[in-house]
Image (spheres, rainbow, N blue to C red):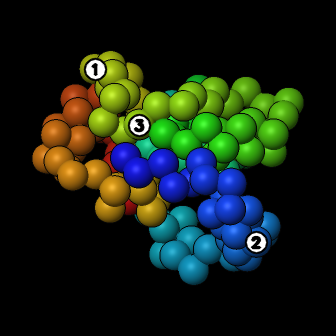
């Protein structure tokens, strides 16, 4: 994946966007995405392309756990960790294509504004299907 988010100039401009400063409430798509989340209490969550970790924190606030956010950008993961201090969220620098997708592991896989960077979506969807527990959800 293109590492534009690790470019200092790009990242500093990205940080000025309202969604970067204000979180999910400033994300235009949030009002449509939020109702797609299942009840999260006790569910395990994987966020593909987690960025600043907004969805990870929302899921944890709703009682989810464990929660893992992955992103190929070191700067994004550093910012997510900084904003999530004291929380039980695991963040990892890892691209969606490189993630191992352990079978039957996650109750919910969420990805917002990240999959358009992926060349082989069939590969990713096959891996997501395998990593979801029976009755699991994919929220895009």
Q: Is residue 76 left or right of residue 88?
A: left
Q: Which residue does the numbered mark 2 point to in the structure image?
A: 16
| Residue 1 at x, y percent in the picture | 37, 46
Number of on-image labels: 3
Find disc 3 in the rendering and name its residue: 95
The tag earlier along the polypeptide, 3 or 2, is 2
Neighbours of disc 3 within 10 Å: few (<14), some (14-19), many (20+): some
Taking depth in this image into account, of 139 and 115 the one nearest to the observer is: 115
73 lies above or below 117: above
Q: Which residue is depicted at the point 23% across and 41% down?
A: 124
Q: Which mark is residue 138?
A: none
Q: Residue at x 16, y 40 (%)?
A: 123
The percent coordinates of residue 95 (x first, y second) are: 41, 37
Q: What crowding class fits label 2: few (fewer than 14 Cα within 10 Å), some (14-19), or many (20 or more)?
A: few
Q: CA distance from mark 3 to mark 2?
A: 24 Å
> Quick one: SS at disc 2?
loop
Q: Position of residue 3 (x, y in %)?
A: 48, 48
Q: Quadrant of residue 117?
A: bottom left
Q: For this rendering, which residue is in front, 30 or 7?
A: 7
Res. 89 image quadrant: top right
CA–CA distance in space, label 1 to label 3: 18 Å
Mark 2 or mark 1: name the one nearer the start of the chain: 2
Q: Secondary structure at mark 1?
A: loop
Task: Answer whether residue 91 is visible to the viewer in this image.
Answer: yes
Residue at x-position 57% and y-position 28%: 92
| Dot label at residue 103 | 1
User: Measured along the vertical axis of the image, is residue 17 above or below residue 116?
Assistant: below
Say whether marks 2 and 1 touch (CB < 8 Å). Answer: no
Going from N to C along the chain, the mark reached first, 1 or 3, is 3
Outermost bottom residue:
28
Q: Nearer the viewer, mark 1 or mark 3?
A: 3
């Amino acid at each position: 994946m293109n590492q534009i988010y690790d470019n200092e100039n790009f990242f500093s401009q990205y940080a000025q966007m309202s969604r970067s400063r204000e979180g999910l409430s400033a994300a235009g798509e949030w009002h449509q995405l939020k109702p797609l989340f299942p009840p999260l209490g006790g569910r395990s969550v994987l966020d593909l392309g987690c960025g600043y970790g907004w969805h990870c924190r929302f899921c944890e606030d709703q009682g989810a756990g464990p929660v893992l956010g992955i992103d190929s950008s070191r700067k994004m993961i550093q910012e997510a960790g900084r904003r999530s201090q004291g929380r039980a969220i695991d963040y990892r620098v890892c691209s969606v294509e490189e993630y191992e997708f352990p079978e039957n592991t996650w109750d919910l896989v969420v990805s917002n504004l990240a999959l358009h960077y992926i060349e082989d979506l069939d590969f990713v969807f096959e891996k997501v299907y395998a990593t979801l527990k029976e009755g699991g959800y994919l929220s895009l």
